[in-house]
Image (cartoon, rainbow, N blue to C red):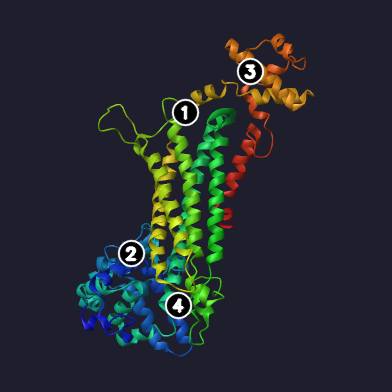
Amino acid sequence: MSNTEQSAKMWSGRFREPLDAAFEQWQRSFPFDVRLLPQEVAASKAHARMIAAVGILTDAELERMIDGLDQVGDIVPEFAPVEPGFVNPRLLGAELGTTPRSIRRWLSRQPEFCEDHVKHTRIVLAKDDPLLLRMKNHFAIQANLNLDGDAAYEEFSATAEADLAASMVHAEDIHHFVELQLTRVIGPLALKLHTGRSRNEQIATDMRLFVREAIDNIMKGLRRWALALLELAEQAGEAAMPSYTHMQRAEPVLVAHWLLAYVAMIERDVSRLADARRRMNLCPLGSGAVAGATLALDRAIAARELGFDGPTPNSMDATSDRDFLLEFTQALATLGVHISRFAEELTIYSTAEFGFLDLPEAFSTGSSAMPQKKNPDFTELLRGKSARLIGAATTLAVLLKGLPLAYNKDLQEGQEPVFDAADTVRGILGILPAFTRSLKFNFERMKTAAAMGYLNAMAAATYLSNKGVPFRKAHEIVGNAVRLGLESGRELDALLLAELQGLSPAFGEDFHAAILLEATLDCHDVIGGTARARVRAALTEARQRLSSDALAQL
């Protein structure tokens, strides 16, 4: 490393010897924390407003700083692609022959442009948004009139490709990268931005912003999956299937009841994520390196600017706290377990041995050796992905368990597991709702399985109990009836009344009607039970809970 490169470091003043070249590359976090560019720019803009409020920046300097940070935020390196749903002003400007600044200024003058269109300095516009279409028409007309001329590209001279490439090579982390780029855009004024702040509070803030946005997106994905399950349950109507305990057939349940069990799991997942979001929604900016900022900053300014509920209460905790990452990954690990259980059941139920459903070909593959095979790749991968999610949570727990207060470089290793967990769940939820909607059940096969194997034995014991027989005695009597059926190769409903009365005089003419499949289902007539009326009510209640307004309250 040259002396010039060493002096460009954010901490270079105290050092005289250059970094070992191999160590320098090994310890960089920029290759993975570059994805925090939108969050870093948003947090830097909030900090700029804080230091402007105490006189570090003039109004004119603040305006230049904010404009420069917007330009930095428009940089999209190849390894940090634009996410679906976001419009990048730099790329759009190149397409339309104008500048990112012109695009942002035009948008700011439109009456329908509001806070909902901005997410951490990124522009949120759907492809068919009338605002986006009108903007394209506006700049197309402007280009035809040559109103911008060659000046349209002057803005990019500050971020020429060579300079951008150099920043990527030398930047230690996303904070260093933004400082280098901002300096190229607005000059020495950029060096004022770090007044009163530390990278320790910056990364704590960036990660909170990242996790908060990830939670919001995951909850939307979970709602889509829950609605897909609900639609399947409604389509199933009163179709029955066996339930299982210890992997043995237990009692008949409605298929809808089985599917609603996963809706209940999803609702807990959403609740956990929402709870974690509420707890983490405090702003670390102003905490400094460890003891708090050395300027009399109004920390509420940054908290408001970034949508936090308020500032964090303790600077030592704020800069070293990663509980929110641990909670986030643990919630995703639990979600992964739920998804894996669903995938496992579908995998088993799709085998020839069960035959309860046929997995859709669009989500399956074949064998390279056996022509007849249709392999459940998607459900098997879902099971496997859960291991990654559990691994991320475990990594965070082990990473944090031995750290003294406050910030330690170990915490850098906590970023990649969080990114991987968020990406893994985003990928799963991008496919799972459509896969769920495409499932086709063999209801006749399921009904046949539910109507045999003495699954009505519990209903038979309940019948005797309702006749006044103590349940323990009723259990024994029905057990004897089951043994009689096994020995003679008959189901309970095929045993003669005289044979049953030989076991207990409590059996009457109404017994066989009491153990029909429908009656067996309906005897579970409690809240949360599989009785047909209860399940119909549960479906209605679940749809009400999954309405957008209700979900927002979780």
Residue at image position (48%, 83%) is: 293
Q: Which of marks 3 and 2 is nearer the N terminus?
A: 2
Would you name the residue on which mark 1 appears? 356
Would you name the residue on which mark 3 appears? 482
Q: Residue 32 carries which label?
A: 2
Q: Are marks 3 and 1 in contact (CB under 8 Å)?
A: no
What is the three-letter code of the residue carrying label 2?
A: Phe
Measure the alpha-carbon separation of dots 2 and 1: 44 Å
Question: Dot 2 surroundings within 10 Å: few (below 14), some, or many (20 or more)?
Answer: some
Would you name the residue on which mark 4 appears? 46
Compared to residue 304, the image places residue 390 above or below, namely above
Q: Which quadrant holds residue 417?
A: bottom left
In front of the other: 115 or 473: 473
Relative image position of residue 253 (x, y in whole percent): 59, 31
Q: Are marks 1 and 4 in contact (CB under 8 Å)?
A: no
| Numbered label tally | 4
Q: Which of marks 4 and 3 is nearer the N terminus?
A: 4
Q: Which dot, 2 or 1, sits closer to the camera?
A: 2
Kindly state the secondary structure of the residue where label 1 is placed. Answer: loop
Relative image position of residue 531 (x, y in whole percent): 65, 32
